[in-house]
Image (tube, helix red, strand yellow):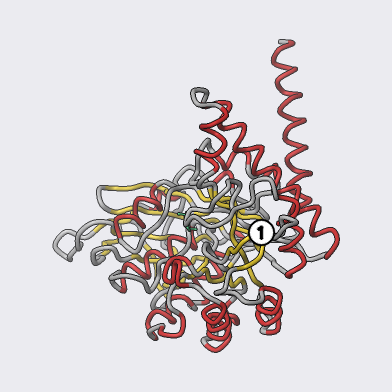
Amino acid sequence: MRVRLALALVALFTGSVLVSMAGAQTQVALTPPMGWNSWNYFAEKVDDKGIRAAADQIVATGMKDAGYVYVNIDDTWEGERDANGVIHSNSKFPDMKALADYVHSKGLRIGIYSGPGTKTCAGYAASLGHEQQDAKTYAEWGIDYLKYDLCSFTPDVMEKRSPHDKAVQMKLMTDAYEKMGKALAEATKATGRPIVYSLCQYGWDSVWEWAPALGGNLWRTTGDIDASWDRIYAIASQQAGLEGYAGPGHWNDPDMLEVGNGHLSLAENRTHFSWWALLAAPLLAGNDLPNMKPEIKAILTNKDVIAIDQDPLGKQGKRAYSEGEVEVWTRELQGGGTAVAVINVGSDRYSTHPFHLDLKRLGLAGGQTGKNLWTGETVTLRDREPIELASHDILLVRVDHPKR
Ligand code: GLA
């Protein structure tokens, strides 16, 4: 009995600490961050000109009006440290402060990338031993967002210091993320410009359990995405069950968008975008903005789907059920509404053997009238409704007044 009481007190105490610490971060990322990141399309080819062009395009294409605000430089911007240890950008980025000023002048924000090891994933200088100094430099440049990528910290520190003890390795990792979290908090005190803190360590050691308490606003939950349906589907599936960890100020990150990249079909692009919205995922486009096709722009700027992602309640969607190759996901929305998604992850379902929606399994009763967010039409979902869906396509319906 006494043990149970003690446990209850511990739970109460940790709960309140988390709430108050999370409360301190809710200044930023109250809804999942939206913007663009250089990596998925440009990788190491990113430069000052490309970032300026992306910022220009975010404004010109209407993406800014649709909510995209962060323009994030990923890996390969880093140059050498000077005699005092201060990091400088390499020749692709002649003047980071001037670039930040340019992005800010467009009404947008700018993000940067580093990691806790000696080197980034692409082999450039990372922050080990220079955490406070780097955070201060970023703050002075006017940076608004940091993606902090584990990479060489594993061989440099974790495996070197504790070759056989995984638990010690994990502690070294969480300490490293905490260190940068504190450094950012300290550095931004001086400028008053908050920096969104994005953890990138591929979901190791159940990062969703500890990232919010050390200042993380988002954390990657898996390894890298690529522009293939198989990878997008694998990552989306791995988000099921993580919905309890997301909320205003702290989000699961299933990685940046591949919408418009590679050879994804239109249906796949649509489903990828919708699925990330259901997951309350950060929406960081990763395509070639100056050469974006109109149909890709239409997907990335679908305001109804973005409204699902950005719903102020901040409740991540969940998998309600699956039946073979069809998955049904729902997301609760502010005001009592719900988003219902039927996703065909397999081959075409024709009128001969359509999928039948079972509303009871969604906790809904009777016909549900809502808006099909890809056609704009008003639709009524009925129990045992036969649904024909092409391969990798989605039916996404917003029901503002569900009947339960
Ligand atoms: C890792 C990250 C990617 C990207 C690259 C850059 O693979 O997961 O998102 O930042 O590093 O080198």
Question: Which residue is located at x 75 percent, y 30 percent?
Answer: 12
- Location of residue 267 in the rendering, given as x and y in whole percent from the top left corner: 31, 70
The answer to whether the beta carbon of the residue marked 1 is less than 8 Å from any atom of ligand 1 is no
* Residue 328 sits above or below residue 288 on the image: above
Q: Residue furthest top?
A: 1
Q: Secondary structure at mark 1?
A: strand
- Does residue 69 show up? yes
In the image, is 112 to the left or to the right of 121? right
Residue situated in front as seen by the camera: 84 or 245: 84
- Location of residue 201 in the rendering, given as x and y in whole percent from the top left corner: 52, 46
Residue situated in front as seen by the camera: 229 or 57: 57
Question: Which residue is located at x 28 percent, y 48 percent?
Answer: 323
Q: Residue furthest right?
A: 190
- Does residue 369 show up? no
In the image, is 182 to the left or to the right of 352? right
Q: Residue furthest front?
A: 83
Residue situated in front as seen by the camera: 155 or 273: 155
The mark total stands at 1
Task: For the N terminus, give its image quadrant.
Answer: top right
Question: Which residue is located at x 32 percent, y 67 percent?
Answer: 268
Q: Residue furthest bottom?
A: 60
Which residue does the numbered mark 1 point to in the structure image?
Answer: 81
Rendered image quadrant of residue 59: bottom right
Q: Would you call the spot at circle 1 few (<14 residues within 10 Å), some (14-19), or many (20 or more)?
A: few
- Location of residue 244 in the rendering, given as x and y in whole percent from the top left corner: 57, 44
Question: Which residue is located at x 50 percent, y 56 percent?
Answer: 279
Rendered image quadrant of residue 58: bottom right
Q: Amino acid under label 1?
A: Arg
- Location of residue 389 in the rendering, given as x and y in whole percent from the top left corner: 26, 65
Residue situated in front as seen by the camera: 57 or 133: 133
In the image, is 1 to the left or to the right of 279? right
